[in-house]
Image (cartoon, rainbow, N blue to C red):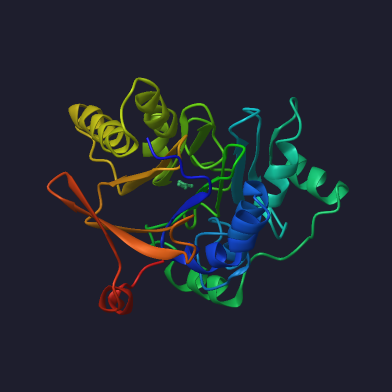
Amino acid sequence: MEHIKHAMIATWKMSLEGMQKASDDLFVNDDRKAALLTAITDVENNPVYHYVGYGGFPNGHGIVETDASYMDGNTMQFGAVAGLRDIASPIAVAMELSGKTKDCFLCGEGAKQYAVEHGFESKEMLSDYARQQYEQHRKNIMEHDTVCMIAKDSEGLSCGVSTSGLPFKHPGRVGDSPVIGSGFYCDSIVGSAAATGNGEDVMRGCLSLSVVTHMKMGMGVQQACETALAQHLERLATTGYQAGDISVIAMDRYGHCGVATDMKQFPFVMMDDEHHNAAVYVCTNEDGTMHIQKADDYWLSQWQGD
Ligand code: GLY
């Protein structure tokens, strides 16, 4: 099988600019962790995106609480934060925590205390726009988009995730994004996967681990995404429960990517050794069959979401 030395995949169109900025980290410096930090902080810092970092919609008490995670597929170590308040880059804190084998998943006040003590930038994460939306519509916004990214360099794979979670969630609510096996998983010997969608639905199937397990059992990366998602949705359906929008991205150990969604269309971003310019692709779900193509100018001009 063709071995791609450098590759990166990310959820949603909002990842495009960050991935473009991460190009030198990946292709010149061969540093997957730096590439993920550059790309994810770019999304976290952008107030235009209302489900990640600064400008994210707040919880039901009007306070932004963020979740983030990072996993290194070589060491299998991970770091995660949940319900983190007033810290500019949740992914940077998760990365720092991934260097530890104990105390690597922190929540709430303890996570904030760790971040402040270790010199991470403090910031009021509620933008004026997000505050206005909270005051006017707080019962009406149900959608949310998580930034998930997987990167491969010559040494292995890593993944990172960051989100402000469900808009107007109950204070303290934690979704799948910082939960290992659910929102993310990474094993450089097999591959990596990450999920976006309603965290409660994703967690019920430990979806990211499920995709990686299907790869471990010998499935190709695209089939693993489709099978893991379909099996999970079918199982939930047997309980009479209709899951909300869920999408997964994945990469195998050779740098090949896969995507699956239960939405009509799910945009994602990729770059690799052959295509150094990160570009937006669209996974279209036609009755359970995934079609993947590069987004053209018309599609990009019409897309309303992140
Ligand atoms: N998938 C992000 C969340 O549910 O919080």
Q: Is residue 106 above or below residue 125?
A: above
Furthest residue in direction front, as rendered: 2
Location of the N terminus by quadrant is top left
Q: Nearer the viewer, residue 55 or 277?
A: 277
Task: Give residue 83's position: percent from left, percent from top.
Answer: 63, 46
Instruction: Count how many numbered circles sit on residues in the image.
Output: 0
Task: Give residue 199's position: percent from left, percent from top.
Answer: 43, 42
Identify the residue at horizontal 70%, vertical 51% (top origin): 92
Q: Quadrant of residue 288?
A: top left
Residue 46 lies left or right of residue 11; in this view the side is right
Evaluate whether residue 212 shows in this view. Answer: yes
Task: Give residue 32's position: percent from left, percent from top.
Answer: 62, 48
Evaluate whether residue 56 shows in this view. Answer: no
Task: Give residue 174's position: percent from left, percent from top.
Answer: 54, 41
Identify the residue at horizontal 38%, vertical 65% (top origin): 280
Residue 102 lies left or right of residue 270; in this view the side is right
